[in-house]
Amino acid sequence: MLVVQKYGGTSVGDLDRIRNVARRIARYRDEGHDVVVVVSAMAGETDRLLKLAYNLVEEPSPRELDMLVSTGEQVSSALLAMALNAMGYSAKALLAFQIPIKTDELFGKARIRDVATARLKEEIANGNILIIAGFQGITDSGDITTLGRGGSDTTAVAIAAALGADVCEIFTDVDGVYTADPRIVPKARKIEKISYEEMLELASMGAKVLEIRSVEFAKIYGVPVHVRSSFTDEPGTMVVEEDESMEKVLVSGVAYNRNEARISLYGVPDRPGLAAKIFGTIADAGIVVDMIIQTGRPDGRADMTFTVPKTDYKATLKLVDKLAPELSIEKIEGDEDIAKVSIVGAGMRAHPGVAAKMFQVLADHGINIHMISTSEIKVSCVIDEKYTELAVRALHEAFGLDRAPEEETL
């Protein structure tokens, strides 16, 4: 059995934890499994490196910033390999360029294009446990890139897909995927099994257990993902193909995202090509737009509101400010004090009235809705950030998520 494991920064946060991880890996090896391990930087290390850079210069070069922050994973992968070798297990640490893991050239948010497997397969055949530095890749021109926050998850699932691994285990500081953030909802329950689509929606809506691109890889290549804690041997949550039992659950989870900002453009000329010009310019800057609402006006113009990650808010404002004179935009406003709250569940496909119930629950608690977005298995609302926790708790209770799984009635 070929097992790919990923250990997050908390799991390798100090030398004692690295030794514990080494012992866990050794147990898998003793059971006869081939093991490939992906590691994050030690907890706090990436933030420390970023602080160094921004204390030195106001706007570090993205290329050099990737060169800097990628060193965190190099440290933890080397230390873990050392620990295993000292225990008598043959282990070898590898960086992305040694494999190689090829990416595009979008520094800080690079996307994986290809994972070469020849060396990996050779090392496994030679009996080595491979410890791979996550979060990083290399361009065709040889520059180091990083995959963005949570990128080690993506590295692990991409490697599991490339090697055809039997399972990809994501070890973290939580013991699985919960119906809501347990820090906000004490009655949140661990979900034993969830579909790729549901996990994809939860991840995109702000659930931080898995990085969204890792779920995309898993779904495309059918990689079973097991989310579990590195501090216990208890089973966690399996992320797998949807089955009939999942459709019986109306809502599987409530997610929230405070990393949202809203930008409104008023008086945009309502003619073909304007939206393409605006959002094409934003996309060219590597900024992901989430929700979009456009409202026509009697004067032949339109008002347009959209959301972007809060970290890209200022950059997006600069871009639309530059476009304003050319496109005759009357006014631009922005708001960073918002949050997105979402409910997700495969059962929504067959049950009408879910959105209406969500809107009523928020209204009953005096929470105004600014924007709405839906899919087959998700409903999202943009609200004032100060109501985030109240909204999550209210929705969790209203949809019965604090009880044992059963088909909900509206």
Image: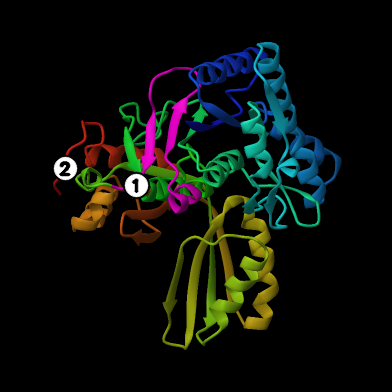
- Indicate left or right for 104 with 359 as reference: right
At label 1, the amino acid type is Glu
User: Front-most of 130 and 150?
Assistant: 130
Q: How is the image coloured?
A: rainbow
Tell me if residue 339 can be seen: no
Label 2: element kind? loop
| Relative to 185, 207 lies left or right | right
* Residue at screen point 40% across, 45% down: 199
Q: Residue at x 51, y 28 (%)?
A: 171
Residue that protrudes farthest toward the right in the picture: 56
Query: 234 above or below 322?
Result: above
Q: Which residue is mark 1?
A: 241
User: Mark 1 falls on what kind of element?
Assistant: loop
> Do callouts 2 and 1 mark residues in contact (Cβ within 8 Å)?
no
> For the residue marked with disc 2, what is the amino acid?
Glu
Badge number at residue 28: none
Which residue is denoted by mark 2 in the rendering? 407
User: Callout 1: 10 Å neighbours few (<14), some, many (20+)?
Assistant: some
Q: Nearer the viewer, mark 2 or mark 1?
A: 1
